[in-house]
Amino acid sequence: MKLIKKLALLFISGDNHFLRIFLLKYGWFGNYTNWKIAKNKSSGYDNQIIIEKVKKATLAVKNNEAVYERDGCLFYEENYNWNLVGILLNIGLENSSILNILDFGGSLGSSYFQNKKMLSSINKIEWSIIEQSNFVEVGIKYLKDEQLDFFESYDDFIKAKGKPKIVLFSSVLQYLENPYQIINFYLSQKIEYIYIDLNNFIDKRPDQITIQVVPPQIYNASYPSWFFNKINFVEFFLNLGYEKISEWRNEEEINYGYHGGLIFRLIK
């Protein structure tokens, strides 16, 4: 009984390191009062190791040795993201079979390579990724072509491609220290569609900061990660002139809350 009480107290306090040994080794843990505390309790990650793994996996996909990759892990069977494919095809129909897509934090093109086969009916696709400088360097050197491009900032992207019809945020907002600042910026640009997927959500609790411990078969790392209160998250968009046109809950199970997705459209 004393051990159970101790584990409960550790969970409430947010000190997940001891608790993890007894409960679950990988996943999301704790409830931290601010990002800095969670970051200090995280191991961080070796960015160079990660980018080399993702580069190797993405080049394998490009060379048709695998169907798609995610987080540097290869997949050999087609598994299209139909929510994403559907909205992109719809935008293509609305815009004379032209797609100008901005993929924020899109790695080396994970979503692009996973779904591009289903977008072959679109006459012109410009799929641009905003990423960290080392990812952009690798992307430009090894992967850039007439459809796929890489940029370090929104300003650089705008100068080269013009205003996008849609911005994608797939499994990225929860890893930003100030996610609502990023969201607010892109909403202020009055981009017509905002697509969000694999986003961390919780119900009936306020936004919470956790630490995610990554399974070593992906890579050795732990870092802060948000879980967003779903109702408040949606309200943020509604209050800034957008309407929700679709939402879903991803099938992938996670231990703290759940992954979900949303599509918003600018109210004209």
Image (tube, rainbow, N blue to C red):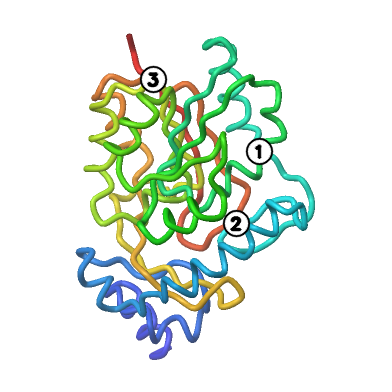
Which residue is found at the position 36% from the left and 32% from the top?
160
Q: Looking at the image, is 243 positioned above or below residue 142? A: above
Which residue is found at the position 30% from the left and 44% from the top?
153
Are the residues at dot 1 and dot 3 in contact (C-beta closer than 8 Å)?
A: no
Amino acid type, mark 3? Glu
Of callouts 2 and 3, the N-terminal one: 2
Instruction: Describe the element under mark 1 as helix, strand or loop.
Output: helix
Residue 70's disc number = 2
Amino acid type, mark 1? Asn
Instruction: Describe the element under mark 2 as helix, strand or loop.
Output: strand
Q: Which residue is mark 3?
A: 192
Q: Residues within 10 Å of mark 2 (few under 14, many from 20)?
A: some
Amino acid type, mark 2? Arg
Are the residues at dot 1 and dot 2 in contact (C-beta closer than 8 Å)?
A: no
Q: Which residue is mark 1?
A: 115
Of callouts 1 and 3, the N-terminal one: 1
In-image side of 58 versus 226 (left or right):
right
